[in-house]
Image (tube, rainbow, N blue to C red):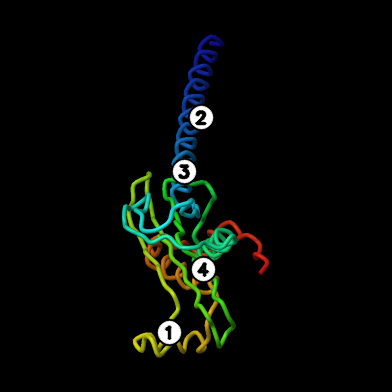
């Protein structure tokens, strides 16, 4: 009798161990899937500039032609901050890891500060960049921004933009902020997240 009880106990223990192991494997698989999904939700970002090249060149990412100009020494820091704040505002997770499944690249070829003040400028600000969205290193979408502010007398079609800017000559930083916002609106609508999925906090403000 004791032998039969011992056998039954062994069989029951065996099945309990099998069920526990199966549950553990399923939990691990679910965790791996969740981690992969989280990785895919997080977008990597990088900001770089055209190096030591003058004139018209091809973009290294999309092959489009661009005219390289002067780039302010603080341009990359300013634009990096603007991209991070833009993603944070849209509740999109981001990371400085460019090897992510989704990768947002900003390729700067012009960042020229204005010469003059708010209401009188000898030379207006000018900003140019390509914003590339890549998935698995494959280019999916591109947004091109290349603008130099013009006086109302030079371009009456931009009268709305002129008054939106308060009738002032804006800085290159403000001009690039407008471009970054347009680019993010164009490329990243499908990556908006629920409020509870808070992204990484943006970096501290860059001193001006």
State the residue position of label 3. 99
Residue occupying the point 54% across, 50% down: 96
Q: Earlier in the sequence, mark 1 or mark 3?
A: 3
11 vs 59, left or right, is: right
Tags 2 and 4 touching, CB below 8 Å: no
Structural crowding at the residue carrying mark 2, measured as other residues with C-alpha within 10 Å and reported as few (<14), some (14–19) or many (≥20): few
Camera-near label (1 vs 3) is 1
Q: Earlier in the sequence, mark 1 or mark 2?
A: 2
Camera-near label (1 vs 4) is 4
Between 195 and 22, the one nearer to me in the picture? 195
Task: Determine the secondary structure under disc 1.
Answer: helix
State the residue position of label 1. 161
State whether residue 81 is above or below residue 154: above
Residue sticking out furthest to the right: 207
Dividing the picture into quadrants, the one containing residue 105 is bottom left
Camera-near label (1 vs 2) is 1
Image coords of residue 127 (percent x, y): 46, 68
179 vs 122, left or right, is: left
Q: Earlier in the sequence, mark 2 or mark 4?
A: 2
State the residue position of label 2. 20
Tags 1 and 4 touching, CB below 8 Å: no
Residue occupying the point 45% across, 30% down: 22
- Picture disc at residue 24: none
């Amino acid at each position: 009798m004791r032998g039969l009880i011992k056998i039954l106990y062994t069989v029951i223990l065996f099945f309990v161990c099998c069920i526990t192991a199966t549950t553990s494997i399923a939990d691990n698989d679910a965790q791996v899937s969740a981690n992969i999904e989280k990785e895919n939700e997080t977008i990597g970002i990088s900001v770089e500039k055209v190096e030591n090249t003058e004139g018209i060149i091809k973009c290294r990412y999309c092959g489009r032609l661009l005219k390289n100009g002067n780039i302010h020494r603080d341009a990359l820091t300013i634009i990096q901050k603007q991209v991070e704040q833009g993603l944070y505002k849209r509740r999109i997770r981001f990371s400085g890891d460019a090897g992510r499944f989704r990768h947002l690249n900003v390729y700067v070829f012009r960042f020229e500060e204005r010469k003059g003040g708010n209401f009188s400028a000898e030379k207006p600000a000018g900003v140019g960049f390509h914003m590339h969205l890549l998935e698995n290193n494959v280019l999916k979408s591109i947004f091109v921004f290349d603008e130099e502010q013009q006086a109302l007398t030079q371009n009456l079609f931009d009268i709305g933009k002129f008054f939106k800017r308060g009738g002032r000559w804006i800085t290159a930083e403000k001009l690039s902020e407008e471009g970054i916002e347009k680019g993010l609106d164009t490329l990243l609508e499908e990556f908006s997240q629920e409020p509870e999925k808070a992204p990484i906090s943006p970096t501290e403000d860059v001193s001006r």
